[in-house]
Image: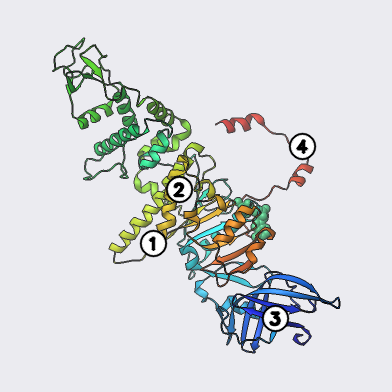
Amino acid sequence: MTDSINAEVISVYPDKVKVAVDDLNSFRLAEEHLKVGSYLRIADCDDVVLVAVIDSFAIEVKDNGDRKYIIEASPLGVIKNEVFSRGGDSIAIPPKKVEPAKISEIEKIYSYGLADKEKFDFSQLSHNCGVRVPVDGDKFFNKHIGIVGSTGSGKSHTIATILQKATSQKSKPYEGLNNSHIIIFDIHAEYPSAFPSSNKLSVDDIVLPYWLLNSEELEELFLDSGDNNNYNQSSVLRSIITQNKKKHNPDVEKIFYDSPLKFDIEEVLNCLINLKSETKNSKAVDRYMIVGEEGDVENSSTTAESGIYLSNEEKLNMYFSKLYEFRPTKASNVTKGDYADGTLDKFVSRFISKYKQDRLNFLFGTASKDISFENTIKQFLGYKENQEANVTIIDLSGIPFEVLSITVSLISRILFDLGYNYKRYASTKGGRQHDIPILLVLEEAHKYVPKSDLARFKASKNSIERIAKEGRKYGVTLLLASQRPSEISETIFSQCSNFVAMRLTNPDDQNYVRRILPDTFGNLTSNLSSLQTGEALLMGDAAILPSLVKIDVTELPPSSSDIPYLKVWKSEWKNLDFEQFTTQWKS
Ligand SMILES: Nc1ncnc2c1ncn2[C@@H]1O[C@H](COP(=O)(O)OP(=O)(O)O)[C@@H](O)[C@H]1O
Ligand SMILES: [Mg+2]
């Protein structure tokens, strides 16, 4: 067959090889038609072969009217003595012979590139069916992963395939679960079908303790970013919460605003309302005119002794306990308290409206008040007793939009802190390495970590950016999926080391991805818009080569599958129980 091939190398550059072919039909292997993305072998002698991937085809018409095909290809590496290595330096120039690579050679590239125990594979070459494309599993999960593609390109299926393989692999046969720990932020409630035995948390059963919110999250929740009194409000909130934490944790020596310790939200609210309505003795401003308390005199006598003397700490502790009545202001004797100027008014009403909202029960309800720190962590990690699970699916679809960012922020932060503290703990236990590394999966990542600087994304952005920057050291990595990569925070996206780039139709997104992807795959990234569903460019430091692959189809797909409209429409008219349906909707 090779004899009939009429092709020659016409130019060689470090990053490009040009090949002229007279008859394209005979320039192919029995197994496949050549396409952009197919592999060529360029040989100078029999035991050194340069492998290149086709970037483009062009047609030249010769003077006599004959056609000639010009193929441009990017060198990938060299097979020498049966072993493939990247880079194209060691080929003797000019190379004599060029032909489509043999399947056995392509297999060699992918099968010898990695030791068996390092291999993790979830796809095969798109053009050379049957050639598996493994990645280095440790490198793949050890660094952040980006999956991009327009809606319907196959991102959710890819995530399911990858995670199903990760949770089913075992180093040796043993009973029970392997040691993978995956948390999925599932915004469309589509993953339960892909992981039937997962730990599932939705707005109905998740317990998110308000007392674990940090300053940013608390402020995002309670303060109106447009309010001029924001600064005062935040400093009041800060001192009240710190003091309340001290009250409830008398044995803890150092307590800060952000310490993960319990406080009582009802008491904080009491205190705020008391502060708003307090009055003081005009002549002795640290005496408070509380009805029924020490020094309380009907009609507020004029003496400097009336009212109760309290230090700031004593006052807050007292204000926590209940709502007090204060003597009204009176000419020059009783004056308004420090916060009677309206500073706290809007804040308090906002506070009450959040705190009393049934929809936020998962944050402020009794379960949130009572849950321990330990059990909070356990629920996210799938360490529920006798119900251990590799995958925890956090269904965000029912979480009210106003608290979506702080929910994502709080959980991500807990996971980061867990990684951080576990590493420290493990090192005190005889230098053990991190043995519960975690993968956090963010579907539709542009929704929580957008480029936008808006206050309502601040909390989730900060928490996730911290994982992006430092999580790897502490065994917490991210898998980010997005249909709008150009709208994701660049800090986060640029930290990804491995990419699965699927069909992308928006030109802004294509350009962005092209810019951020490692520039080793010739022109292939210019074809992002023509990829089939389930097809992807797989690249990054865990890949043997950047490759055009077809992701394996999963047997347990996420429930994101396209609705077969026409088929459904062609069936008989369906009645809908509106009463039942709207009752559930409204609840
Ligand atoms: N690897 C694949 N091979 C074939 N079809 C696929 C593959 N991945 C996804 N699909 C199909 O494509 C459709 C969209 O997939 P999905 O994963 O929901 O895309 P996305 O999350 O990018 O919107 C689904 O109906 C699914 O059946
Ligand atoms: Mg999806």
Q: Earlier in the sequence, mark 2 or mark 4?
A: 2
Which residue is pictured at 52% across the width and 66% down the height? 169
Whichever of callouts 4 and 1 sits on the residue coming sooner in the sequence is 1
Q: Is mark 2 within 8 Å of ligand 2?
A: no
Task: Report, in whole angstroms, how far the alpha carbon at label 4 lies from the one at label 1.
Answer: 57 Å
Mark 4 neighbour class, 10 Å CA radius: few under 14, some 14 to 19, many 20 or more:
few
Element type where label 1 sits in the image: helix
Which residue is the site of mark 4?
573
Q: Which residue is mark 2?
A: 461
- Would residue 266 appear left or right of 181 to someone viewing this image? left
Q: Earlier in the sequence, mark 2 or mark 1?
A: 2
- Can residue 551 be spotted in the picture? no
Query: For the residues carrying marks 4 and 1, which lies nearer the camera in this image?
Result: 1
User: What residue is shown with label 1?
Assistant: 473
Q: Earlier in the sequence, mark 3 or mark 2?
A: 3
Q: Is any part of residue 231 visible from this angle? A: yes
Q: Determine the residue positioned at 42% across, 48% down.
A: 462
Residue 473 horizontal side relative to residue 587, left or right: left
**What's the residue type where badge 2 is placed?**
Lys
Amino acid on which disc 4 is placed: Trp
Q: Secondary structure at mark 2?
A: helix
Q: Nearer the viewer, mark 2 or mark 4?
A: 2
Residue 10: assigned label: 3
Q: Colour mode? A: rainbow
- Which mark sits nearer the N-terminus, 1 or 3? 3
Which comes before the other along the chain, label 3 or label 4? 3
Quarter holding the N terminus?
bottom right
2 and 1 marks in contact (CB < 8 Å): no
